[in-house]
Image (tube, rainbow, N blue to C red):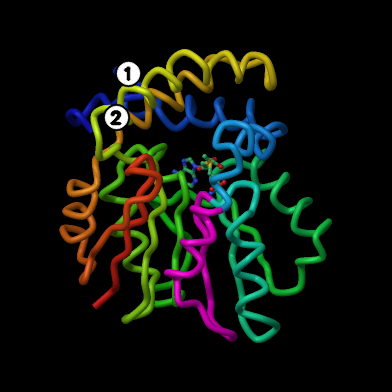
Amino acid sequence: MTDNKTTHFGYKTVPVQEKAARVADVFHSVAAKYDLMNDLMSGGIHRLWKRFTIEMSGVRPGQRILDIAGGTGDLAARFARLVGPDGEVVLADINDSMLKIGRDKLMDHGVASNVRYAQADAQHLPFGDNTFDCITIAFGLRNVTDKDLALRSMLRVLKPGGRLLVLEFSKPTSNLLGKAYDFYSFNLLPRMGKLVANDAESYQYLAESIRMHPDQPTLKGMMQEAGFTNCEYHNMTGGIVALHRGFKP
Ligand SMILES: C[S@@+](CC[C@H](N)C(=O)[O-])C[C@H]1O[C@@H](n2cnc3c(N)ncnc32)[C@H](O)[C@@H]1O
């Protein structure tokens, strides 16, 4: 946040109370084409980023998992299989359009009995203290208005010893890759969005919001500040994406 009254929405400065509605418009607009666009934009690599997230989660049968900003349910579906019938996965998202696509997809894939759905804001999680063994937020934190508040809320609902995994776009580690990635993001991505989803603006927001998101060391510092311990991050695809992990003491 830039000060008490304004924040950023991509490169725009907007009143704090407006950001959530603008983010909601983006995800209502892209929901139906979200999975297709993910595969097209990343050439399918987002599946590998998510697979690594699952590996780093250490999730075991019987555990309770919260996937916040879970959208169309890619991580929740994998967690549901890992925790088995004695475990539970909560797929939570602030946006009912995304949540509905996620619920339909999981049901189509035969994943149902151990998954619950919640329309929830990452900043004010409607769960009791010390509820979950693991929380994931994939490509979601970038969109949250007050990230520090969200991190504290996640810490509260994690069990002691539980872990948070934040999968998010981050800062490329090489200048050359950064330049190529900028060209792709600001020239090709909005055109792809226009062509496939008839929505260039949402994909322009995507590119801008990535640039406004805290880089790897800054996010690690925010997690430590919120109260997480043993915080670390792993760059993937040259830092285009990073997975941060921290534990509740
Ligand atoms: C880019 S999608 C990511 C979906 C999914 N996690 C994935 O990796 O494919 C971002 C999601 O964050 C959700 N979101 C944005 N702000 C949120 C908030 N404050 N609390 C919870 N979810 C939020 C959006 O509705 C959207 O579904």
Residue that appears at 39% across and 26% down: 181
Q: Is residue 171 above or below residue 17?
A: below
Residue 129, x across and y down, in percent: 38, 73
Task: Say which residue label 2 marks.
Answer: 212
Residue type for callout 1 = Tyr
Residue 25, x across and y down, in percent: 56, 25
Q: Residue furthest front?
A: 176
Residue 124, x across and y down, in percent: 40, 53
Circle 1: element type: loop
In this rendering, position of residue 38 left or right of residue 14: right
Residue type for callout 2 = Met
Closer-to-camera residue (172/176): 176
Magenta residues (range): 48-69
Residue 59, x across and y down, in percent: 50, 77
Give neighbour class at mark 1: few <14, some 14-19, many 20+ (Cα, 10 Å): some
Closer-to-camera residue (131/182): 182
Does the closest atom of ligand 1 sit within 8 Å of the Cβ of label 2? no
In this rendering, position of residue 182 left or right of residue 36: left
Give neighbour class at mark 2: few <14, some 14-19, many 20+ (Cα, 10 Å): some
Q: In the rendered view of the protein, which quadrant contains the C terminus?
A: bottom left
Residue that appears at 68% across and 68% down: 115
The answer to whether marks 2 and 1 mark residues whose Cβ atoms lie closer than 8 Å is yes
Task: Say which residue label 1 marks.
Answer: 11
Q: In the rendered view of the protein, which quadrant contains the N terminus?
A: top left
- Distance from the alpha carbon under mark 2 to that under mark 1: 7 Å
Circle 2: element type: helix
